[in-house]
Structure formats: structure tokens, C-alpha cells
Image (spheres, rainbow, N blue to C red):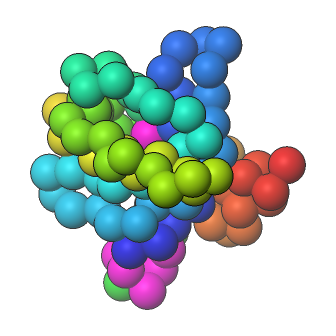
Amino acid sequence: MRLPAIVRVDPENEFHTETQNVSARGVFFYLNRTLPAGTRCEVTLTFPPHITLTDAVRVRFTARVIRVDAPLPSARIGTAAMIEDYEFLKSTGSSDFLSALTREVGN
């Protein structure tokens, strides 16, 4: 499932990307740098209405990197992370979270 996402390793390291796959237990995304296995990260994304069958739902996962796919030359690095915890985020006042996140990823 491809969804715009923000991956935060710490306050100084935040990356805008797109998930390639999301399940109840894990998430896979590409980055321009390697996150070593065992690295904890936060992944924030919005599940759109066609997935939730209701309103868009913004979620933040706490995850731990469990696999890093070696890139091809000049390719992005595939990162698999196991979801350890999650929280649903409150509305920011905008009824269209997906558009807001998409604009944020585009910057």
C-alpha cells in the first residue's frame, strides 16, 4: 500500500517518503540513507477513506528496523520495520488529512 509518510529517527533526522507496504505488524519504505537494523523510528501516515471505509485516519507508529535491502547503484534503500506501538493522531482542523500530508511530503 503506497502512502505518503514521514519517518523520524530523532528530532534532527526526518525523512519524507512513501510506504511500499503496510500491515498490522510492519511497514516497508524507501529512504536515501541506511538506517541500521535495530534503529527505532517513528512513521507517520494517513490511511485514506477508501482503506478505512470512513474518514481519513492519521496514525503514528513506533517501529524498529529489522531489515535493510542493499540498493542498486543510485537507488533508494529499502527499509523494513516492525511496528511496536501506534497511536491515532487528533485532527489538525483540516478535514482532508491525506492532502495535508501529501503537501507536507512534497515540500
Furthest toward the front, the residue is 73
The answer to whether 29 appears left or right of 31 in the picture is left
- Residue furthest to the right in view is 107
Report x, y in % for residue 55: 48, 73
- On the question of residue 81 being in view, the answer is no
Magenta region, residue range: 43-52
Q: Is residue 103 above or below residue 12?
A: below
In magenta segment, residue 45: yes
The residue positioned farthest toward the top in the image shown: 11
Nearest to the observer: residue 65 or residue 24: 65
**Image vertical order of residue 50 relative to residue 34, above or below:** below
- For the question of whether residue 13 can be seen, the reply is yes
- Asked if residue 98 lies left or right of residue 26, the reply is right
Residue at position x 61%, y 13% in the image: 11
Residue 36 included in the magenta stretch of the image: no
Q: Position of residue 103 (x, y in %)?
A: 80, 58
Q: Quadrant of the N terminus?
A: bottom left
